[in-house]
Image (spheres, rainbow, N blue to C red):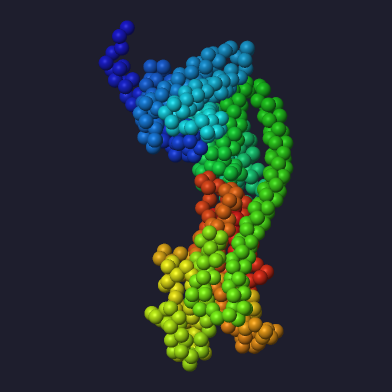
Amino acid sequence: MRPTPGHALATLLRISALAAAYFAMARLGLGLASLSESASPVWPASGLAVAGLLIFGRATWPFVLIGAFVANALTPGVGLLTAAFISVGNTGEAMLGALLFKRVDRIDRERLQVSRAAAFGLASVIAPVCSATIGISALLVAGNLSWDVNLGAVWVTWWTGDALGILIVTSLIVAVGEATAARYRPSYLWATLFSGLLPVLGLTAAGLLLPFLPVARTLLGPAAALGIFLLYPAILLAARRYGPVAAHLVVLAAATAYVLGTAAGIGPFIDASLNQSLLNMQAMLATFALTAIVFSDIPRQSIRLASIVFLAGCLIASGVFMDRTDIARSRDDAHMGKIVDNAMARIHERLLVYSNALQAGAALYATELPVGRAQWKAFAATLNIDGRYPGINGIGVIYPVPVDGLDAFLARVRADGAPEFTLRAASAEAVLDDFADALEYDIITYIEPLASNAPAMGLNLASEANRRDAILRARDTGQPAMTKRISLVQDAQRRAGFLYFIPVYAPGQPLDTVAQRRRALRCWIYAPFISEVFFREALRDMVDEVDVAVYDGGVVRPDALLYHKITPVGLGGQLAARLGLKSPTLAMPDQISRVDEGGTP
């Protein structure tokens, strides 16, 4: 019998509406793809596809093909032919899932009491194999995936997202289609307000919020994660009081909240990557979905005993989970401790290397041979700064000059190969209101390589409090010192940086007291650093699983940030350690940097 025009139009409208819904769900899932742009661990569209064929019949299969094709064609790098093959796999999955469900669901209840649960289970396990296999094969042939990647992980991710989509979305839509209105009338809800509705809502809210709220984690610590187990009694009570629809709505609420929380990098499922975190979450959601399906399918005469046994198992599982969480946390803390120690050792080692270079410059002055511009340039060339000391901007000499000796000093420097040498302030922020009252000038006289550091020549460091405090601290203690966060005048990008000083004293002079060290001071050897370059070199080859932020001083704030190593995509920052950065050889009592490991600042 030929279909009437009205029937054909109704079918076309259904296909169009379902295709639009499938497209929206597919784009939502692809937005959470990280391991591969086309393989998402969250794929609710598969559940809609199977449910659409179950409810509206196999004739509506084009909606899956159309929705999947358009969604994948809009994915960057995926060609139209590849999108077409992926959509064929998604369509085959939907048709296979619907076929398996109908065949198993028709089994007589005397032969299989939980035939509905078995139907959902079989459809969710077998049908996604079609989509995952065809989709990944198409991506490999098209070159969107290479054989070098972990294809097994990509396949499991694809299969998991589709399987959970069928378990959660299909089961909810089928339950809604078969629901009776009696259990959802206001009179029944009011009659069961205290025995059913409020307990279900309370347990659900606790199960959704406790694992994710910062205040809950602060008050309860790791025990807050046990809130996820409160959803099991919520699902059981919802199934008994209000039927399958209520039980599946609890699962849907959990899926929504857990996906959002995990994607935001919070909650009990966080792992090294976003993809793995979502897979961990999906494993828990699978148990919720199966609980709702099974307990909606168990005959009423058997549900009491089954519920008692199941809840007892949940209590045991929560205890095991807590114990495993404590073990994992202890292991992670120990691992984080090793990472922190490694990072600190690298930074201190790099500081020592640079300090040795500056000490070599001090040794040059200890020979008491004349040191002029030519001698300093030759010395710096032997250091091979760019090759042997990556991260350092240069190496220079700062001379203290009495106020009354400035003119004679400038004349000597200009005669020594720098005819245009001039005195300049290091900053518009002066140490004194009237700098003419200062006792001396502290002038950058030599700096190599000159080409990249020319703007620093002639700077009077005594004209700016931060720089002046550091050089005077080095002079008075006889130890290396560094400035707080500054912007180097020679850095066109005005990035955060710092200066590192070593005092040089006249040979043979007593240095036991501050007064003696002040009288014996000849100059300072110094090095300018751009923080980003220094810390990047110091932490080169460090493991990629942590985020590092270095701050100037004891307060974590944006204007004190020296360096921030960007976290890999999906790192949740669940581990963190803060510690002071202070080398035993550095005299900087008022300035201790902080290094944050494992979390975003």
Q: Position of residue 85 (x, y in %)?
A: 41, 24
Q: Position of residue 462 (x, y in %)?
A: 50, 82
Q: Residue 425, can we see it?
A: no
**Residue toward you, 363 or 533:** 363
Query: Compared with residue 482, is residue 229 higher up or lower down, i.e. above or below?
Result: above
Give the residue drawn at x 41%, y 35%: 27
Query: Compared with residue 470, is residue 140 higher up or lower down, i.e. above or below?
Result: above
Query: Compared with residue 442, is residue 329 higher up or lower down, i.e. above or below?
Result: above
In this rendering, the count of numbered labels is 0
Give the residue drawn at x 49%, y 22%: 130
**Residue toward you, 26 or 212:** 26
**Residue toward you, 352 or 570:** 352
Q: Position of residue 541 (x, y in %)?
A: 58, 51
**Residue toward you, 129 or 241:** 129
The quadrant of the image that shows the N terminus is top left
Give the residue drawn at x 72%, y 39%: 320
The quadrant of the image that shows the C terminus is bottom right
Q: Position of residue 581 (x, y in %)?
A: 62, 65
Give the residue drawn at x 39%, y 35%: 77
